[in-house]
Amino acid sequence: MIEEDWIKNAVGALAPRCTAVGLSAELDIETPDGVSLWSGSYAAVAFWPISEAQFTAQAGRAEAWFADYLFGEERRRNARVVDGYLLLALDRPVEDTLLDAVRAVELSTQICRKHAVWPENDGVWRRFDAVTVLGLPEGVTSASGEPTWPVLDADANSLWTRIQKSGPKRAAEAEDRRP
C-alpha cells in the first residue's frame, strides 16, 4: 500500500468518529503537510503520520507543534482548556523492538494525551478505540451556551446563603441544629 492510501484510509475511518463527538475537520494553514486536525469546543484531535525509524524524534516534533496549537486555541478562547489528543500514526503494527519507545511516548503526561495508532493486518484501525474522546457515545455532546445556575427554592437559597457567608462546615453544623 502506498503512503497516501494508508493515510487516506485512516482519515476515512477517523473522520466519522470525530464527527460523532462534535469535532469538525479544521483547515488550519499552520498544520504541517500530511497532518489532519479536528476540533470542537472542548477537544482537538491531531492525526500525525510518523515513521517507525524516526518514531521518537518525530513524536517530539509532533508534540511540540500540537502544544503550540493547543496553547493558541486556549488563548483564542480566553483560557478555556482544550483537551488534546495526538494520534501518532504508523502504516503497520509496530515491531516488538519499538514497543518500549511507543509506551514511553504514550505514558508521557506532557502536553496532551498521545496514542500510537496503526491498522491491524486486516486494515482495521482498532487502536482508535483506545482514544478516550473517540469512545464517547453518540448523541448531543454539549449544551449550547454557557451553563446556568439552577433555580433554588426558599430553603435551598437560605442554605446557600449560609454556606457563602460562614463556610460549608458552619452551615452544615447550623443545619444539624435546625428542628
Image: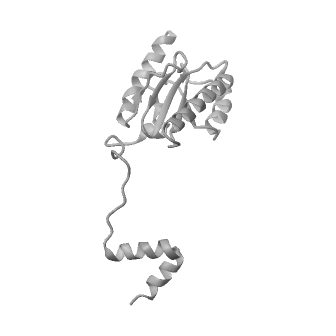
Confirm whether residue 127 shows in the render: no
Q: Is residue 145 left or right of residue 94?
A: left
| Label tally | 0
Q: Is residue 21 left or right of residue 168?
A: left
Query: For residue 151, what is the image quadrant?
Result: bottom left
Q: Percent from the top left, x then y, of residue 51?
A: 61, 18
Residue sitting at the far top: 2
Query: For residue 55, what is the image quadrant?
Result: top right
User: On screen, 77 above or below 178?
Assistant: above
Q: Is residue 70 left or right of residue 136?
A: right
User: On screen, 61 above or below 41?
Assistant: above
Image point 40% across, 33% down: which residue? 23
Image point 34% across, 47% down: which residue? 143
Image point 63% across, 31% down: which residue? 102
The way the protein has been coloured in the rendering is one colour
Image point 50% across, 9% down: which residue? 2
Which is nearer the eye, 122 or 51?
51
Which is nearer the eye, 130 or 18?
18
Q: Percent from the top left, x then y, of residue 136?
A: 40, 42
Confirm whether residue 132 shows in the render: yes
